[in-house]
Amino acid sequence: MTAIVFSGLQPTGTLHIGNYFGAVQNFVKLQTQYKCYYAIVDYHAITVEHDPEELRRNTLEMGMDLLACGLDPRQCVLFVQSQVPEHTELAWILSAVTSYGDLQRMTQFKEKGEGQEFVSCGLFTYPVLQAADILAYKASKVPVGEDQVQHIELTRRIARRFNSRFGETFPEPEVLLSEALRIMSPAEPTRKMSKSLGPKHYIAITESEDSIREKIKTAVTDIGPRPDTNEKSPGVANLFLLLKLTAPKEIYDQFEDDYARGVLKYEPLKRAVADYLVKTLEPIRARRAQLKEAEVREILIEGARTARAVARRTLEEVRERIGVGRVVL
Ligand code: AMP
Ligand code: TRP
């Protein structure tokens, strides 16, 4: 039987090349090997302050970006979390087999809550909803980055506790770590590329050619030079990583060789990075430009319909096991 894969992405707005190389490219590969469910997790996004109009917009944009990157509705199920209400229902049920102490240990909660005037209870129980996302489909593989490993471990504990109390129901999902790569901000290469740092710090997958060239051209290369070791400075290492991800191996090797011989010039390196990045992103931009909003909405609705049929069956089983519902029978 083909294994079931589940992953979720928050609707944070435009995808950037960090998201693409760090996560989405892997989603695209997996869809040909497994039964994949990918959700745009809007209910996770409301656990911190948000603007409703922006969330609505970002949810659709994320759908468009994911399709442009190559998620194919014929090969995977792509949907919006809130359109499958079974997720939230299951989250409530699972909260009863989730340890309060475990939730207190979640580092993402501590990080996101730190220094905030208002910390929602939803931010605290966020990992339970994440567990419900995964377990509603009885997924056994979850492609995520390093930062989510703790949440998947918690999901395993939740599944285990449920199974031991109510009988074997859920598999214990394992993490499919995408290649552990971190794309750094071109403007400040000691920090991870992220939208929240501002436009200088990320390159969107749909960015114009001019803007990509400008950001690569002005990318910081020289902070923290390490003359004593042969190690690349963070900015140079980031350019090499981008080249590795986009250029043919011979080209990459040539620059590595120049570097090793101490004759590397930043200008041609940057030009090559910009050229290959533009080339890699071009088909994505072209697909994105062709997508019609109405068509994307249809795909998401259809995805939710398919997902819901599966989640509903899980919920029927779960309700039965825990002894709720069917009171009159
Ligand atoms: P986020 O938008 O930060 O929740 O990230 C969504 C996905 O993209 C996660 O799987 C992250 O691990 C991945 N991701 C985000 N930023 C980067 C980055 N700079 N480099 C590599 N992967 C990233
Ligand atoms: N918490 C994840 C993140 O911030 C997103 C997410 C929600 C998720 N539900 C999920 C990831 C289920 C994997 C599986 O990136």
Image: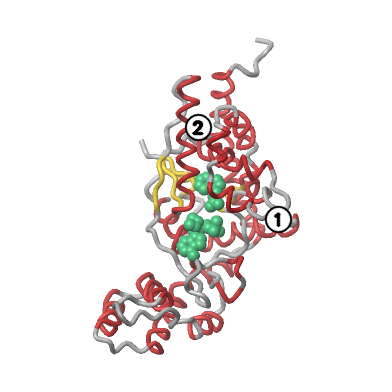
Q: In which quarter of the image is residue 251?
A: bottom left
Against 103, residue 230 (above or below) is: below
Q: Name the residue under label 1.
A: 56
Looking at the rendered structure, the secondary structure element under dot 2 is: helix
Q: Which of 4 and 289 is in front in this view?
A: 4
Q: Nearer the viewer, residue 163 or 251?
A: 163
The answer to whether residue 77 is visible is no
- The residue under label 2 is which amino acid type? Ile
- The residue under label 1 is which amino acid type? Arg
Numbered tag placed on residue 247 in the rendering: none
Looking at the rendered structure, the secondary structure element under dot 1 is: helix
Q: How many labels does the image show?
A: 2
Q: Where is residue 108 in the image (x, y as percent from the top left)?
A: 55, 50
Q: Mark 2 points at which residue?
A: 158
Q: Quadrant of residue 253?
A: bottom left
Against 7, residue 216 (above or below) is: below
The quadrant in which the C terminus is found is: top right
Q: Residue at coordinates 57% horizontally, 40% vertically from top-left?
A: 104
Q: Residue at coordinates 65% horizontally, 37% vertically from top-left?
A: 85
